[in-house]
Amino acid sequence: MQKKRLASPLTPAGTPSAAMSFSYTFDNDFFENETSTYDLTPNTQACPQASLGPAAGLVLSVVLVAIFVLAIPGNVLVGWVISTNKRALTPSDVYLFHLTVADGLLALTLPFFAVAFIRGWIFGDFLCKFLNLIIEANFYTSIIFLACISIDRYLAIVHTRELQQSRRRSCSRLLCAAVWAVGWTLALPALFNTTTAVSLGDQPETWLCTESFHIGRPTAWRLATRGLLHVFGFVVPLAVMVACYSITITKLLHTRGFHKHRAMRVIIAVVIAFLLCWTPYHITLMVDTLLRAELLGLDCGVQSAVSVALAGTNSLALLHSCINPFLYAFVGRKFRSKMKLLLQRKFGRDRASVSKVSRSTSTSEVAGTVL
């Protein structure tokens, strides 16, 4: 554990972490020289400390709680419907189930950081590392599973005859294990997070969960972790999604069938939601990375604005975890029919209604289970 005394005022937990703003903590390295001295004075600080303010901290805390409330039941419901399917799961079903697990685990950590926005980090050093590890691992796995779903839809629609569904099923389970392994490996930099005691002027000491590099040069470590985040957390998955969905839509445009327009509508919604939720965060993070590397010059006003913007855009990115159930499940006609069927069986509705619903569940395999 470390202790720092800041010479200028700062709202606790006001600025995001250096490598992953999911930490919901401030990063003092952005505003000080890279030295081992923690007793800062105005002469040693490059810029005054950034501050969200108590009102903004409260708003972001409420946003996190709202995302938690929406994400948990939505992902649990999707997972329940998929797991109770008596038929063999399609590869898209398998990826979607693992996606709901990843989004659900990520959402379970949000109440801790909602409290940290208001009271600082009160949960100790172990949870500081462990919760950030969970968030970063499931951040990577959820985005990679989105790319896997796009690949499976591409294979199911464009290469229907070449690849048998049984082969895709067997490969999907191995691929899921690989995705989890890759996600947790990429998340290991979260172990750099540690609790830090901060004294804000004459105010009482506050504990924060913040990133701290103690091996080699902090700037080099930061650039390396940021590079992994941008490449494997955004650029590669987005490139895969755009390529697969572009070819898929082209194929559907030349296919006769009732369900093709519905499939196109869901595919377009998926890409738009991904871009709207994640693009602002990654653009802001890239600007922050360039500022930290001193490639854009030193401007205290821009640095402070970017640090505050990271908190807001990060909350928007987290919103994607509760949007996924709607995009991949609730919009899909077949999923809604399965859900109604299960609920009617659960609560003992009449069999005639159940039979009517079950007949409506037969949709084309080409369109995909969740469409």
Image (spheres, rainbow, N blue to C red):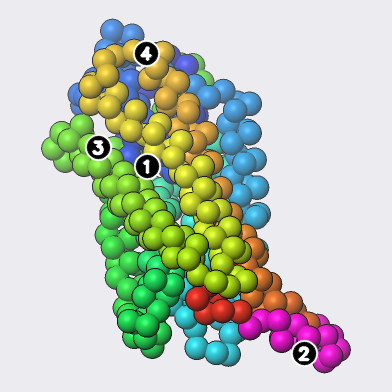
Mark 3 and mark 2: span between their CA atoms?
58 Å
Question: SS of the residue at dot 4?
Answer: helix
CB within 8 Å, label 3 to label 1 = no
Q: Amino acid at mark 4?
A: Cys
Q: Comparing marks 3 and 2, which lies closer to the viewer?
A: 2
Question: SS of the residue at dot 2?
Answer: helix
> Which badge, 4 or 2, is on the more N-terminal residue?
4
The label on residue 355 is: 2
| Apparent side of residue 211 relative to residue 223 in the rendered image (left or right) | right
For the stretch drawn in magenta, the main secondary structure is helix
Number of residues whose C-alpha sits closer than 10 Å to that of mark 3, classed few (under 14), some (14–19) or many (20 or more): many
Mark 1 — residue?
Answer: 20
- Part of the protein shown in magenta: 345-362
What residue do we see at 28% from left, 40% from top? 226
Mark 1 and mark 2: span between their CA atoms?
49 Å
Question: SS of the residue at dot 1?
Answer: loop
Residue 172 percent location from the top left of the image: 37, 77
Q: Amino acid at mark 2?
A: Ser
CB within 8 Å, label 4 to label 3 = no
Q: Amino acid at mark 3?
A: Arg
Mark 4 — residue?
Answer: 300
> Which badge, 4 or 3, is on the more N-terminal residue?
3
> Which badge, 4 or 1, is on the more N-terminal residue?
1
Residue 91 visible in the displayed image: yes
What residue do we see at 65% from left, 55% from top? 70
Mark 3 — residue?
Answer: 222
What residue do we see at 26% from left, 15% from top? 297
What residue do we see at 62% from left, 71% from top? 258
